[in-house]
């Protein structure tokens, strides 16, 4: 699952992938969508006054998504606190979890 | 211990405002398809308060009718008799109890859960091709016994709510411990007094123990709808507890992950809108 994440240029690291064409004020493309950042290109962007950058994040889901997953998980644990031992309640808990956040309850 | 004898409950229920004859007739008609719609429409029209609220519901966005419905006859022609019957019985029954909060009992949350169960029951009925309006009404009323208890045994019920929080227990268990009866048993008495169809009485009576062979499909639907409504967390009750699922009811409804997901989605889609109509 890939997400687009906005970072300040200071947070950017070599190896990250650009999510959208990066243009200067005149509309010239500095780096095309999909290009990988290098230490050199990050320095070059800084010199040109670029402050923010959109990158494709393949690893962890975005922070708010992770928070939502945590919220759903802890609420389900609370709602099922008396019934989770039952096989069917356990199954229903998974169904609701998959419905809400796309994966089984851990 | 402060046991409430059944005879006492029956007496209290008789003090409740009776449902009008036409509402009773409508409820009884759920079992029969060959009824005189025209004569029922005329009878409903005689009850002005009921007619007014029913038309407000019929004209709400839930039904999405483009122009204004001005009479019960028009409502039946446009929405269909079954929908209007559900509207009227819903209006009549929800209107027969007070709305203000009593102690720790939160009416808003009570009706939110009842409506969530009703909407979910309707979706489950649609999945197994059972009568959807019947399921909606039974779902809406499954906890009605709580309203009798909190309205007529206010002090004792406050202790029930207290115990429930202190022991983090199911309301049903707290009721049994404090009152020696529970809302399912009281709901059975009330729905029998209101002459609801037999299946509906059973669904209300057994929504917490839906394991009995002689119970019908409606009991299974209401039991699972109650469980799902809690699991979807729609009542806004912080202390809510999902009941233990009856495997008998679960198997009867042939639920899969795919079907459950569809039921969840449709339930949530309709829920807030119906809440607006019925409790605001």
Image: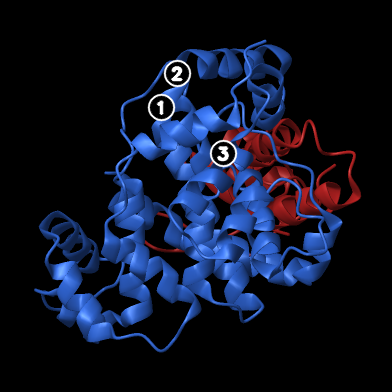
Chain colours: A red, B blue
Instruction: Look at the image and tell me whether residue B87 can be seen.
Output: yes
Q: Secondary structure at mark 1?
A: helix
Q: Is residue B137 left or right of residue A57?
A: left
Please identify the quarter of the rendering in which residue A17 is found. bottom right
Chain of the residue displaying label 1: B
Chain of the residue displaying label 3: B
Instruction: Look at the image and tell me whether residue A29 can be seen.
Output: no
Could you classify mark 2 by the number of other residues whose Cα lies within 10 Å: few (under 14), some (14-19), or many (20 or more)?
some
Q: If you read the primary sequence from the N terminus, does the residue marked by circle 3 or circle 2 appear first?
A: 2
Q: Is residue A17 left or right of residue B29?
A: right
Residue B167 on image: x %, y %:
73, 15
Determine the CA span between mark 1 and mark 3. 12 Å
The quadrant of the rendering that contains the N terminus of chain A is: bottom right
The quadrant of the rendering that contains the C terminus of chain A is: top right
Q: Secondary structure at mark 3?
A: helix
> Which residue is the site of mark 2?
B154
Label 1 in the same subunit as label 2: yes
Question: CB atoms at circles 1 and 2 under 8 Å apart?
Answer: yes
Determine the CA span between mark 1 and mark 2. 6 Å
Residue plotted at (60% across, 32% down): A10
Chain of the residue displaying label 2: B
> Which residue is the site of mark 3?
B186
Residue B139 on image: x %, y %:
53, 56
Q: Secondary structure at mark 2?
A: helix
Disc number placed over residue B151 in the picture, else none:
1
Residue plotted at (49% across, 39% down): A51
Disc number placed over residue B218 in the picture, else none:
none
Residue plotted at (72% across, 30% down): A78
């Amino acid at each position: 699952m890939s997400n687009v994440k906005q970072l300040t240029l200071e947070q950017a690291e070599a190896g990250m992938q650009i999510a959208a064409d990066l243009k200067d004020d005149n509309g010239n493309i500095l780096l095309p969508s999909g290009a990988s950042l290098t230490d050199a290109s990050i320095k070059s962007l800084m010199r040109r006054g670029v402050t923010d950058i959109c990158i494709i994040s393949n690893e962890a889901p975005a922070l708010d998504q992770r928070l939502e997953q945590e919220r759903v998980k802890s609420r389900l644990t609370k709602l099922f606190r008396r019934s989770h031992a039952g096989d069917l309640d356990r199954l229903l808990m998974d169904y609701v979890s998959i419905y809400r956040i796309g994966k089984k309850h851990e | 211990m402060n046991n409430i004898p059944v005879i006492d409950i029956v007496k209290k229920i008789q003090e409740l405002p009776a449902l009008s004859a036409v509402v009773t007739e409508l409820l009884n008609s759920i079992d029969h398809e060959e009824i005189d719609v025209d004569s029922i429409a005329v009878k409903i029209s005689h009850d002005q308060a009921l007619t007014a609220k029913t038309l407000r519901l019929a004209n709400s966005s839930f039904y999405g009718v483009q122009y204004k419905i001005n009479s019960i006859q028009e409502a039946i022609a446009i929405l269909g008799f079954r929908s209007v019957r559900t509207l009227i019985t819903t209006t009549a029954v929800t209107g027969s109890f007070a709305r203000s909060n009593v102690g720790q009992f939160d009416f808003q949350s009570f009706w939110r859960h009842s409506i969530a169960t009703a909407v979910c029951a309707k979706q489950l009925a649609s999945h197994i091709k059972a009568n959807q309006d019947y399921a909606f009404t039974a779902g809406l009323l499954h906890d009605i016994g709580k309203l009798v208890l909190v309205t007529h045994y206010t002090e004792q019920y406050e202790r029930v709510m207290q115990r429930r929080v202190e022991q983090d227990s199911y309301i049903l268990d707290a009721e049994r411990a404090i009152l020696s009866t529970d809302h399912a048993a009281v709901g059975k008495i009330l729905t029998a007094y209101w002459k609801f169809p037999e299946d509906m009485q059973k669904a209300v009576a057994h929504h917490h123990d839906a394991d009995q062979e002689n119970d019908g499909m409606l009991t299974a639907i209401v039991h699972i709808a109650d469980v799902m409504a809690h699991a979807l967390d729609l009542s806004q009750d912080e202390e809510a507890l999902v009941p233990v699922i009856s495997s008998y009811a679960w198997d009867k409804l042939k639920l899969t992950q795919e079907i459950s997901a569809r039921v969840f989605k449709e339930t949530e889609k309709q829920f807030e809108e119906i809440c607006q109509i019925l409790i605001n």
